[in-house]
Amino acid sequence: MFLFGANTYLEALDRYAPGIRECVTAAVASERCDLDFVRLDHAAFLASPSKSIDYAVMEKTDHGVVIPLDAGWNDIGAWDAMAALGQADDNGNTQRGDVLSIDTHDSILLADGQLLATVGVSGLIVVATPDAILVADKAKAQEVKALVEALKRSARSETELRHIVHRPWGSYEGLAHAPRYQVKRILVKAGASLSLQKHHHRAEHWVVVKGTALIVRGEETLLLSENQSTYIPLGVVHRLENPGKIDLEMIEVQSGSYLGEDDIVRLQDSYGR
């Protein structure tokens, strides 16, 4: 763990790693705001030398000291490190979530949102999430990094998109998708609203599961409560708002020839998008 003042670190970068300082300074100078995020300039940041603080500064400075700290720290830098936390059962398994294991030993079994069942295996890492499923030899846990690089080279969407996508107004979760339709669970925070928008390639069906929805649909304004629904035809201007005191939960069914997130024409937006 490193502790220093920001100015001290920047001065050290100027002295020992000026290339990093120059690129990062350029990235900050060209930053832009996106929703509630501040994004650095992509090209400038990528141009920075890829060096850790250890090699770039700490091995060269004469202003550093080491202070012992007994805090029970564990980086958990790989899946097998979880087994070292002392949470294994009598069979040596570390389990989280909905897991059923029979004749399974010395394994790490993590389930998020679905049943994970194993029979007669040993020394494995199995991680099941809505995004992907990982099965690996426990002894080769560090090689997961190579797997991630392979996914990036293949331009797989899993490296960029997540099952649950957060927005300033709430979040949405993908439930099902196919070439001409997809289903989402939409959560809108109390008092929040989406942009006034339209789509060129898709229509949408909305079903309110919990809370109250105030909907602009063309020239109409609708107030829907639980178990009520509406239809947004292709090309119709619309907006979704939560006027209530609790979160609004909806199921959205999209249908059309193209369902990408870039098929959103925003006409008015509270978040400056």
Image (cartoon, rainbow, N blue to C red):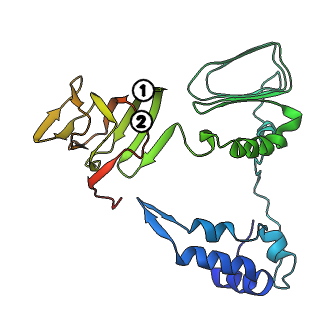
Q: Residue at x 22, y 35 (%)?
A: 212
Instruction: Name the side, left or right, on which 114 lies relative to 140.
Output: left
Asked whether 123 or 152 is in front, the reply is 152
Characterize the local packing of mark 1: few (<14), some (14-19) or many (20 or more) Cα atoms within 10 angstroms: few
Picture quadrant of residue 85: top right
| Disc 2 and disc 1 in contact, CB within 8 angstroms | yes
Residue 88 rendering spot, x and y as whole percentages: 78, 30
Residue located 55% across and 43% down the image = 161
Callout 1 amino acid = Arg
* Label number found at residue 180: 1
- The quadrant of the rendering that contains the C terminus is bottom left
- Label whose residue precedes the other's in the sequence (2 or 1): 1
Is label 1 in a helix, a strand or a loop? loop
Q: Residue at x 79, y 26 (%)?
A: 93
Q: Nearer the viewer, residue 33 or 116?
A: 33
Type of amino acid under label 2: Leu
The answer to whether residue 81 shows anywhere in this view is no
Which of these two is toward me, 8 or 137? 137
Front one among 81 and 26: 26
The N terminus: image quadrant: bottom right
Q: Where is residue 117 drawn, in percent x and y?
A: 69, 16
Rendered image: mark on residue 259: 2
